[in-house]
Image (cartoon, helix red, strand yellow):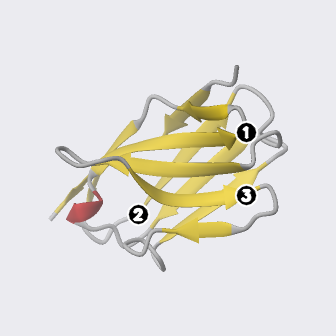
Amino acid sequence: QVRLVESGGGLVQAGGSLRLSCAASGSIRIFAAMGWYRQAPGKQRELVASITTGDNTNYADAVKGRFTISRDNAKNMVYLQMNSLKPEDTAVYYCNAKSNWGDYWGQGTQVTVSS
């Protein structure tokens, strides 16, 4: 069982930046991919960005060019650098670890972007 803990959320003005961190209690090398998802009030949870063990990345169209996902296998950490934030980025952001036997989720961190 791997535990994921997100941090770094908060309130920021539009145009600002935040860096989210996801700390895993065990090795992230065992997972096929790590990712960040978000869920806004009244909306479904959606993929924001993902990164594979081979460092292949994938981004939602809405965040391409503004967000960057990265991983540090030695520290068992995954990051999401968010720049040029917009009010529509407001959501709870969740860290995800994807494996052949199932997914693991963190508890989420709130990101609020004011206009």
Q: Amino acid at mark 3?
A: Thr
Q: Which residue is mark 2?
A: 17
Q: CA distance from mark 3 to mark 2?
A: 24 Å
Using the numbered discs, state the Cα–Cα distance from disc 2 to disc 1 in whole angstroms.
34 Å
Identified at 75% across, 39% down, the residue is 76
Q: List x then y, in percent, for residue 89.
A: 30, 60
Q: What type is the residue that disc 2 sits on?
A: Ser
Drawn side of residue 63 relative to residue 98, left or right: left
Query: Which image quarter holds the C terminus?
Result: bottom left
* Rendered view: 115 above or below 37: below
Q: Earlier in the sequence, mark 3 or mark 1?
A: 3
Under circle 1, the secondary element is: loop
Amino acid under label 1?
Asn
Image position of 36 (left or right of 85) = right
- Secondary structure at badge 3 equals strand
- Residue under circle 1? 100
Find the residue positioned furthest to the front. Answer: 101
Single out the mark in the foreground, 2 or 1.
Answer: 1
Report the residue marked by disc 3.
Answer: 52
SS label for mark 2: loop
Judged by depth in the image, the label closer to the viewer, 3 or 2, is 3
